[in-house]
Image (cartoon, helix red, strand yellow):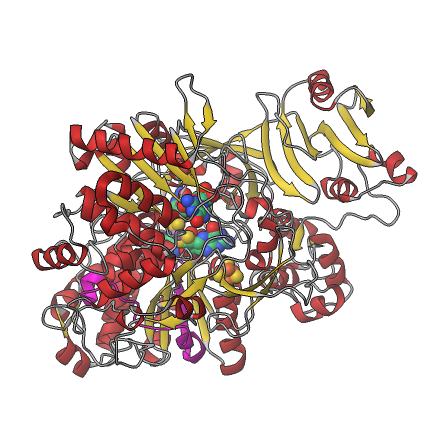
């Protein structure tokens, strides 16, 4: 961690990653880097940061950054151009296509990683001036089922609770959320509540995640059965006198229908157990806990949203909270955990194709109101295409021009190979990006526009609890990078809409956005930040984190709906009768398993940011698939081998992790790898493009799949200061390592092939070790006393110790002894392999931790006292606890332990 020079001033900003929205203090080092620490005054984190937030300083480098506008020339090559030429070109081509084919032929695809100001300007241009609602966002893949569920129940997309509820609840129910890895700072806040106040935690997930490690009750339900579980709960509440009849009577409608449906879906505890695959006693325990605990918060995320019945799942949860009146009260509320740093801001401006702006919809009065406010010449009058449908329309040639900002759809959309192929059909394909290369950019982009990145850009983001925080710039924007709002505004001016896009700063945009939220509102719409519409530039700069609604003349409201006043026409909430839950697809003999996809602790999405951090690359460096031991046995795959996973849409080759944390019949694979970082791990290409009928959100967690073993003769790794062009036909994955890039490899070529490839890549001046009979080849090139490039190849697990060689590679100079022993690939005096890294902050490996446990460390705190592991960000504490729980009891079967620790 970089030392902070007290002479340099710290800037208060907000983390670039998840929807927790932690406050960050960034102190630039004067060389383009910065020291990062948690902001003790920010109410989301009070100074805490998780592993990703702590490592933000390692992601600020300019390697791989897009620094200048580029246009594809007639010879197919991307060439640097001036900003004016790039903007003229984009405007001219959009104008031409709209004139020829109408506004429906163009589209924007935006992102929850844009700032609210960027989002506002893009939405205004498309919906108010181009006159199409074909503007959607990656939030469609992320939060849209929650949005639809909120709107059906509350009449508006409102998150009723706040983070303090997590401190004040007596029962925390997490369903479809791996918060220990995905919202770590909030999860730690929940654990503090458990320790101090004895709050109980229930985790509902087909996988036994690290979040489940701290649960009082874990419900490993069958995928897609949340609706049945919460329907059964509603029935139980009714039958056991736990309803708030007064609240239901006065403030809601639709209870009887919803109740009847719930009874038909899961009319008893036994029926619920049958429908969800859970033990009846566990279901009963959960129902009793919920019924008997007034202060309960139900937190949910992608296991609920990313489902072909996602909206119904959301409403089944909301029904239980409405029926008990546990909504918007201290410690009692439903709580949608948002994913991206500005998932909420995008919803506020109306970045989804089925919203208009400022939480207004495509109703005649709203359309008219927004038209007048914007003085819009051609306002869109009906909903546009949602993400998956948008890409299908591109594939059919109906959408001819697409502008992607801040998202990587060639990786993250379901059926991602089809999405990638669709991009190739566009007549005009524009991407605003931070990076020069990703799978989307590499799908035939015509115009590349360099956007300012985190640390350079400036504006606002809204976190899961409706709290608007400033992201502030603390670095000089590199090259010719520009704010996203500026880029869109310049194109709007060139399309002839200058008067409406005359913004000079993010503050300008924010004031207009705030004014629209209050325009003819009068309390009729939930989203109102009117009190901020006249902030001066200075006040915007100094703006402290604040929750909406912030109506002029009214006190802030951290919670909504306890008063029973909702945003529907009659101000009542609606119970929704969910459809009987059935998964959209059946498993078959050919596809006997279900592929679930999600996240790992230390990577963010397609790794364009976290992939730059050596610290974050240590935890789980390889793309993997997790499988239950019984399914592994049946399909003949073994731990640490390779397997091919196939669905009706695509295939991958992944490393196998055999683990009892996975339920029978299911596979789990993380989403983070792309063609940039691995040869065979574009997991999105395997995912079925089925969507929820209300929200349009795809089902990312239940695609029928098959798995077969895949053999490689050789395994190995390479480390290099510069990026390597690897030979074809090999399995590889790349991570950042201290001092350069690390590649993990496997293939079936012969050693001579490796040797000649390395000579071509690194020159002939190599130190080499070759054992043809043993199938081992190890070689390194040096620059002065530092390793420049090295390659270790061998049969199966004999290539050498990656962790040992990595630490030699990190050294500025090798001693003669180290140089001599390097090619043994084994640990030597003073350099024992610590095993795969568990604690990213202090680089503490699994072997070191297991040794400490064997030597008597019996709690995470004791491990921390000995090794520092877990004492900075705390993200690895769940894993430390797991290692303690799995430590062998003297005399126990050692195979069992092997199996258990293999899972991550
Ligand atoms: N480390 C890290 N953190 C992140 C991100 C990241 O990329 N990396 N991304 C951020 C973003 S954008 C988002 S949206 C959030 C996502 O945060 P989460 O939703 O917590 O993450 P996921 O891993 O996608 O899925 C959560 C869990 O849903 C479970 N699940 C699957 N099917 C079902 C089901 O039918 N029912 C139930 N109850 N559970 C099911 C999965 O097994 C998984 O453990 O994370 C945010 N935080
Ligand atoms: N199978 C499967 N698929 C999934 C999911 C899943 O669980 N399973 N989860 C879905 C979810 S919840 C999400 S949120 C998505 C995430 O998927 P994506 O949004 O596609 O993933 P990112 O890697 O975050 O892509 C962001 C891109 O924007 C760039 N970028 C970052 N900041 C800026 C900026 O300020 N301006 C501009 N112009 N560019 C910027 C980055 O370099 C990067 O290329 O994936 C979805 N896809
Ligand atoms: S929990 Fe971690 S990733 Fe999320 S905002 Fe906080 S520091 Fe950033
Ligand atoms: Mo997300």
The residue shown at (33%, 61%) is 510
Q: Nearer the viewer, residue 327 or 651?
A: 327
Q: Which residues are magenta?
A: 151-176
Please tell me whether residue 182 belongs to the stretch shown in magenta: no
Asked if residue 207 can be seen in this view, the reply is no
Asked if residue 64 can be seen in this view, the reply is yes
197, above or below 749, in the image? below
Question: Could you tell me residue 618's position as x and y percent?
Answer: 64, 48
Q: Nearer the viewer, residue 859 or 888?
A: 859
Question: Is residue 314 left or right of 42 when viewed as pictured?
Answer: left
702, above or below 512, in the image? above
The residue shown at (36%, 66%) is 283
Quadrant of the frame with the N terminus: bottom right
Question: Could you tell me residue 226's position as x and y percent?
Answer: 31, 58
Question: Is residue 825 left or right of 79 when viewed as pictured?
Answer: right
Please tell me whether residue 170 belongs to the stretch shown in magenta: yes
Question: Is residue 263 left or right of 459 when viewed as pictured?
Answer: left
The residue shown at (16%, 70%) is 524
């Amino acid at each position: 961690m970089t030392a902070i020079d007290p002479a340099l001033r710290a800037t208060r900003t907000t983390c670039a990653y998840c929807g927790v929205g932690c406050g960050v203090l960034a102190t630039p080092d004067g060389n383009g880097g910065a020291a990062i620490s948690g902001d003790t005054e920010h109410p989301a984190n009070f100074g805490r940061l998780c592993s990703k937030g702590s490592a933000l300083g390692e992601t600020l480098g300019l390697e791989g950054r897009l620094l200048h506008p580029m246009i594809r020339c007639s010879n197919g090559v991307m060439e640097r151009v001036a900003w004016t030429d790039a903007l003229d070109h984009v405007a001219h081509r959009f104008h031409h296509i709209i004139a020829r084919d109408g506004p429906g032929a163009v589209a924007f695809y935006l992102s929850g990683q844009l700032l609210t100001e960027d989002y506002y300007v893009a939405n205004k241009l498309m919906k108010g001036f181009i006159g199409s609602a074909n503007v959607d966002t990656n939030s469609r893949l992320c939060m849209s089922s929650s949005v639809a569920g909120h709107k059906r129940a509350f009449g508006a997309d409102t998150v009723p609770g706040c983070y303090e509820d997590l401190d004040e609840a007596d029962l925390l129910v997490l369903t479809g959320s791996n918060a220990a890895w995905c919202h770590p700072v909030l999860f730690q806040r929940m654990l503090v509540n458990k320790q101090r106040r004895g709050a109980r935690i229930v985790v509902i997930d087909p996988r036994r995640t690290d979040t489940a490690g701290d649960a009082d009750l874990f419900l490993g339900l069958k995928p897609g059965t949340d609706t049945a579980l919460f329907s059964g709960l509603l029935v139980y509440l009714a039958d056991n006198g736990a309803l708030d009849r007064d609240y239901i009577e006065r403030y809601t409608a639709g209870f009887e229908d919803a109740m009847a449906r719930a009874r038909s879906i899961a009319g008893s505890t036994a029926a619920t157990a049958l429908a969800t695959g859970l033990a009846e006693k566990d279901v009963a325990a959960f129902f009793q806990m919920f019924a008997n605990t007034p202060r309960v918060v139900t937190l949910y995320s992608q296991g609920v949203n990313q489902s072909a019945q996602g909206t119904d799942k959301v409403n089944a949860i909301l029904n239980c909270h409405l029926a008990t009146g546990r909504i918007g009260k201290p410690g009692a509320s439903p709580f949608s955990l948002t994913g991206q740093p500005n998932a909420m801001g995008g919803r506020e401006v109306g970045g989804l194709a089925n919203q208009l702006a400022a939480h207004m919809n495509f109703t005649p009065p709203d359309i008219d109101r927004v038209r007048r406010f914007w003085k819009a010449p051609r306002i869109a009058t009906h909903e546009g295409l949602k993400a998956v449908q948008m890409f299908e329309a591109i594939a059919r040639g109906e959408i001819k021009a697409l502008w992607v900002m801040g998202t990587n759809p060639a990786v993250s959309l379901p059926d991602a190979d089809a999405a990638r192929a669709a991009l190739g059909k566009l007549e005009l394909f524009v991407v605003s990006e931070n990076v020069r290369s990703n799978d989307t950019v590499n799908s035939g982009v015509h115009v590349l526009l360099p956007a300012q990145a985190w640390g350079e850009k400036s504006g606002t983001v809204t976190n899961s609890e409706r709290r608007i925080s400033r992201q502030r710039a603390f670095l000089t924007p590199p090259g010719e990078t520009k704010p996203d709002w500026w880029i869109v505004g310049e194109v709007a001016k060139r399309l002839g809409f200058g008067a409406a896009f005359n913004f000079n700063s993010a503050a300008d945009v924010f004031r207009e956005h705030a004014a629209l939220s209050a325009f003819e509102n009068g309390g009729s719409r939930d989203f109102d930040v009117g009190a901020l519409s006249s902030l001066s530039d200075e006040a915007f700069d100094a703006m402290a984190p604040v929750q909406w609604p912030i109506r002029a003349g009214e006190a802030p409201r951290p919670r909504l709906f306890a008063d029973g006043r909702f945003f529907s026409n009659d101000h009542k909430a609606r119970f929704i009768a969910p459809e009987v839950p059935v998964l959209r697809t059946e498993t078959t003999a050919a596809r006997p398993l279900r592929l679930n996809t999600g996240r790992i602790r230390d990577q963010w999405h397609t790794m364009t940011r976290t992939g730059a951090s050596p610290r974050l690359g240590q935890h789980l460096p390889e793309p993997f698939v997790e499988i239950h031991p019984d399914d592994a046995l049946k399909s003949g795959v073994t731990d640490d081998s390779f397997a091919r996973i196939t669905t009706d849409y695509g295939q991958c080759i992944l490393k196998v992790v055999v683990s009892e944390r996975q339920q029978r019949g299911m596979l789990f694979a993380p989403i983070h790898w792309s063609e940039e970082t691995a040869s065979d791990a574009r997991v999105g290409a395997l995912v079925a493009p089925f969507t929820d009928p209300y929200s349009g959100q795809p089902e990312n967690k239940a695609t029928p799949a098959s798995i077969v073993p895949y053999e490689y003769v050789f395994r190995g790794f390479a480390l290099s200061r510069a990026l390597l062009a690897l030979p074809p036909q090999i399995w590889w994955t790349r991570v950042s390592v201290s001092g350069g890039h690390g590649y993990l490899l496997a293939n079936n070529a012969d050693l001579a092939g490796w040797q000649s490839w390395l000579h071509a890549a690194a020159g002939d001046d190599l130190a080499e070790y070759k054992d043809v009979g043993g199938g081992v080849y190890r070689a390194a090139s040096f620059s002065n006393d530092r390793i420049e490039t090295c390659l270790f190849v061998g049969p199966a697990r004999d290539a050498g110790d990656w962790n040992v060689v990595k630490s030699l590679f990190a050294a500025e100079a090798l001693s003669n002894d180290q140089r001599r022993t390097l090619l043994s690939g084994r640990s030597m005096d003073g350099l024992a392999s610590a095993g795969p890294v568990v604690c990213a902050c202090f680089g503490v490996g699994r072997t070191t931790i297991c040794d400490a446990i064997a030597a008597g460390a019996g709690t995470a705190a004791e491990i921390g006292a000995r090794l520092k592991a877990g004492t900075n960000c705390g993200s690895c504490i769940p894993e430390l606890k797991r290692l303690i729980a799995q430590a062998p009891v003297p005399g126990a079967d050692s195979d069992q332990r092997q199996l258990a620790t293999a899972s991550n």
